[in-house]
Image (cartoon, coloured by chain):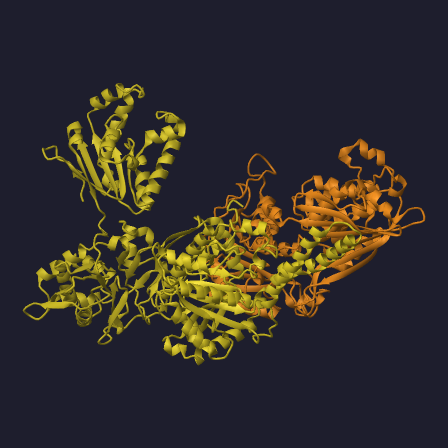
Amino acid sequence: MSATEAAPAAAPPVLGVPEMGLVVLVGVSGSGKSTFAAKHFRPTEVVSSDRCRGMVSDDENDQGASADAFSLLHTIVDIRLRRGLLAVVDATNVQSRARQELVRIAKDNDVLATAVVLDVPESLALERNRTRPDRDFGDHVVRRQRRDLRQGIKRLRKEGFRKVYVLRGPEQIDAAVVERERAWPDRTELTGPFDIIGDVHGCRAELEELLGELGYTLTRDGRGRAVGARHPEGRTAVFVGDLVDRGPDSPGVLRLAMGMVRDGDALCVPGNHENKLVRALKGAQVRTTHGLAETLEQLERESDEFRAEVLEFCDGLVSHLLLDGGKLVVAHAGLKEAYHGRASGRVRSFALYGDTTGETDEYGLPVRLPWAREYRGKAAVVYGHTPTLRAEWLNNTLCLDTGCVFGGKLSALRYPEREVVEVKAHRTWYEPARPLAEPAAPEDGRPEALVDIEDVGLGAAGAGLHVETRYGHVHADAGSCLAALAVTSRFSVDPRWLLYLPPTMAPAPTSAEPGLLEHPNEALAAYRGAGIGQVVCQEKHMGSRAVAVLCRDEEAAGRRFVPGELGTVYTRTGRPFFSDPVLGAEVVGRLRAAVTEAGLWDRLGTDWIALDGEMLPWSAKARTLIRDQYASVGAAARAALPAAGRALAAAAARGLDTDALAARTARRADQVEEFSRVYRRYSWDTDGAAGLRYAPFAVLATEGREYTDADHLWHMGIAEQLAETGGMVRGTRYLAVDATDPDACASAVAWWRDLVSAGGEGMVVKPVLGARAEGAKGLAQPGLKVRGPDYLRIVYGPDYTDPERLEVLKQRNTGRKAGLAMREHKLGLEALARHARREPLWRVHEAVFAVLALESEPVDPRL
Amino acid sequence: MLLTITATATPEASATDLGFLLHKHPDKVQEFEQSFGTAHVFYPEATRDRCTAALLLEVDTQALLRARTSVSTPDFALARYVNDRPFASSSLFTVALGKVFRSAMRGSCPSRPELARTPLPLELHLPAVPCRAGAEKARALFEPLGWRVTAEPVPLDPGLPGWGDSHHLSLTLTGEQVLSEALSHLYVLLPAMDAGKHYWTDRSEIDKLLRAGGAAGTGEEGAEGDAEEGARPGWLARHPERAWITRRYLDRRDGHVRTALARLSEVLGEDGTGDDPAAEEAEEAEERGPSLAEQRAGAVLAVLRAERVSSVIDLGCGSGRLLARLAEEPGLERVTGVDVDTVALERAHRRVCRGCEGGPGRHRPLLAGASGRRGGPSGPELLVGSVVHRDRRFEGHDAAVLMEVVEHIDPSRLPAMAESVFGLARPRVVVVTTPNAEYNVHYEGLADGSLRHSDHRFEWTRPEFTLWADSVARRYGYGVRHLPVGDERPGTGAPTQMGVFTR
């Protein structure tokens, strides 16, 4: 770690260079920097001032462009360092001023700076420059550079370079070997499984008990003291720091932890208490408050040798650890994403003390900034430091300090299982300065209510949403996100209610039957072709899609959704289903009553439930649409077509030939009547909640789980139970079909014909296995709709059955719609999974919002 | 889709002379291909006493779908398939009318030249005229032209009792009219009533309108116009509803409407201000004093000046009326506008930008990404954003303004707004204005308990606003003072209430 004056002797000098960080080459013009850089680094890693000069001026030697060239160079270096890459600066860097700017950029990015000095004899440099026609500056330039260099070499450490390598002469330069060094915190190769243990603070007995709970076997020395612990399945314990102070036996805890680390059974990061202990043991003057006095007193009773071991152990701890391929970060006081895997005083200070404001609160304790509330990183961050009542996840971070020494609990996290294991404190060992707080985030203990603009793919960086789902990546572009934002921000229900938005549904592939656009055969064949034999045909209700989230009591709503409420019903775009809050509350009340009466709270072991279904009649929600888009078309036609018919009849009576035209006009009139019958059938008057019917077809989620893995017969069973309560819930007729059995398929077709000829919209064919059913090509379409020929008049127009129209419609590409349905389906599954895992609001909302974005007509993001 | 024109005999002419005027023989059934279908002309009756010509347009829905017209790409996704165009008297129909009866509309009739200039007893019938403005409007449009009007609303649906009438009218016009004028009335007024043209309204529509309205002398066409100068101004220029008709016919395109109205005024020999509704409105406004919106902006500015703020973020800036005034404020180093509506933000950009590139008046589109982008170095920064989301870009401003914004937020989302603005952005000063519901009794035509704007989620009384403001101030450590904006009336206070939060 010290400045290496590479020995002029035989062994080739080895230069340790960080994988992520800054390397500054220092040397006069002609010292061979570019050659050295090309030999040891990838071209993309090298940022050369000559190249930058060329980029901004078309002339690599235009000294007049130097200011702009360095501005570009600094920008590139800054970006590379921010992105966690190596940047090698190929410029003379002989002047202190030039180097300082680079060191500042490294510091800003919390990475280490390394200087490599190439010191060649002046004569060699001059000769090299003379052989290069593009370097026509005089010898005095090189001499001046060399003078600057000689003066500067001694100052490099002081300037902030953590490592300085000086290579003297061409032989040494040629012989040098560069070795990439990983940053200390980088232990990504360790994949665990881990048991991360919270702040122990000298509570040895509780620690031994917790290790026992976790399945570790303790080893003891001759005096019965625990000196190690090993898990039979090879798990690794990770201590989050603050092993010492306040508690009854800090030396005992150290002995055990140090033994485990020594034996490879544990890892450990330092806490602020270890940091202070190190200073005290080194003899620095420190105030022995916050339990340090007790620790020092306990250590007094130990041997000098033990104290030396303690000092060596604590002093050697690395500020934080990056584990499991970068998916897990352990740091005593937590760590924001920009600091993961980095090394600087600032990073160490954050890891030890957290993001403090420098102010103190009314108890004299430092005020901490809520970094975890804003955390959006992919890595889980597990930490301690701030005693709280419970260990609770917030934005993929978890604080494990549950105040054992203050009479709370000692907690551990099993990772990757993400289970919290805890043991109670045997007693209050130390009186807390302030009472234990609720878990980190929202002061009032509610789920966080606010979504950041960047969480929906917009804001400063805004480039749309990229959602990682279990079934692959789904992208919504910025324009679609903008359009969706305009809707959600003005009309949607509180985002805490939105655990899911229903995906759009693909129609069955176009029917081969003459005169028909959709037919059950194609839907059954599509599933059969995908390797799915067992399907269920469900009656398709013609109403408005409605997701109902119902809570047993306000406690459940406050804990999981929105305090002070009991539930909500929202539309497929996330808007409140009922604009009248009184009516909305009445419907929620009736549906809750049905859940209670059906005994579902107990049966499903939950105090809330989310249902997906259809609210009837269609006119309850869509009255304006029916009026303006459908009935008014019927009205115009009923006024115009008979008048035309009469005029044609009169003309015919005069002996004019109008037969063909009259026939067409009459056919139009019939088609319009068919068309009108469709929307009339789905319109009836309701009076408040009376007359409304809700037909659920899936249980989406209950406390702690979601039901996309449940088969549809189970879902239909729940729906039946709800319908049997006789309230506003209506059942859904269905038929389980073996798509590989021709007779079963024929009966499905007959069943469909009965439904549509009786005025039904049609049916939906779904894999029996449920939403997560997979076929030969992976995830299957969750459903295919097969709508009746009459119903389709309100989709494609009254006259769509005319042969020339139908011919065109049969060419319609259902693939695009199917692709969209699949992407939205993946997002829906992901949203429910994240909600069930109690992931933070923004994570659930991201997937939900993306569904809406995909459904939105994009706004031109350039406006 | 259907128009019948019935003529009755006069002492001078047989009813069947209608055939000469229309250039269509009464004993034939004729077809005319149109872009979007086929027009048929036939005569249901043709006697000496009474003769009826029928124009029947059969719309080809497939052609309409292919064409990607405004009918085929509306907001409502399915309207391209399901719409009243095949049945109603829409712009499709008037285009056919203009083509099939082109000569008749010009008043040319070589075989009966006198007749073409003579008012005849006519009856026009259209069974389904889309007119959302209602039957009253139809009467107001046709009666000044000398028609007796029967306008019956078409019932919506016999199968949906209680749903009322549709927005279509069964329209019968009777009167003594020159046939060419009668046709031009339909040519102009049917699309105006419907206000849903299937084609793009470009500048040539102005000429079409003025020609059909009888004011053919167009400034740009010079010589031809001079020839008709001194003749009686056309029917449109004299029509009391000409502003409404012009606006609707020209699809509300402001520039076109102004041009057309100016040219109509010229025909009348007016100086262009006398009867201009816009000018009248402006004059009236001057007498009334500054509008409430202006007073509101003035009050906000006064507060910002008194608080000596150095930077402002206008949350919910809309089309930038306040932003424009903030941009003029000398004391402000930084002005930012935020809105979730990108269309409004684009308007705000044009209003506050002093020219992005290539000089004044030239604007590059707001390169938004999602973030919106600076309106040029000289203008305020504009951001697409929403106050119910946390947004780092809101931070670092001395003051935030929420002018007439909170009432557009669902009450359940207000805490999120408060957290974002007061809790996280935490400007030193926050100015909130919102309507005072108590004042609503002074608005005529505002029914009891109804709100001033259809998107208002609520309107607060003064105590309700105070209650909310106090709780927000307490929660986030602000002090708040309340001020009235607009004319105060005893008992009800001012139309707008303002809360000034400071910390």
A794 vs B316, nearest the viewer: A794
Q: Hue of chain A?
A: yellow
- Spot occupied by residue B418 in the image (x, y as percentages of width and height): 50, 62
Q: Is residue A448 visible?
A: no
Looking at this view, name the residue that lies furthest to the right. Answer: B11
* Placement of A112 over or under A491, stated as above or below: above
> Number of numbered discs present?
0
Q: Position of residue A690 (x, y in %)?
A: 57, 76
Q: Position of residue A87 (x, y in %)?
A: 29, 39
Q: Please tell me the colour of chain B.
A: orange
The relative height of residue A246 versus residue B151 in the rendered view (above or below) is below
Q: Which image quadrant for residue A320?
A: bottom left
Q: Quadrant of residue A234?
A: bottom left
Q: Answer with left or right where residue A633 lies relative to residue A422.
A: right
Closer-to-camera residue (A233/A685): A685
Question: In the figure, is residue B232 to the left or right of B255?
Answer: right
Q: Position of residue A595 (x, y in %)?
A: 44, 77
Whether residue B380 appears in this view of the structure is yes
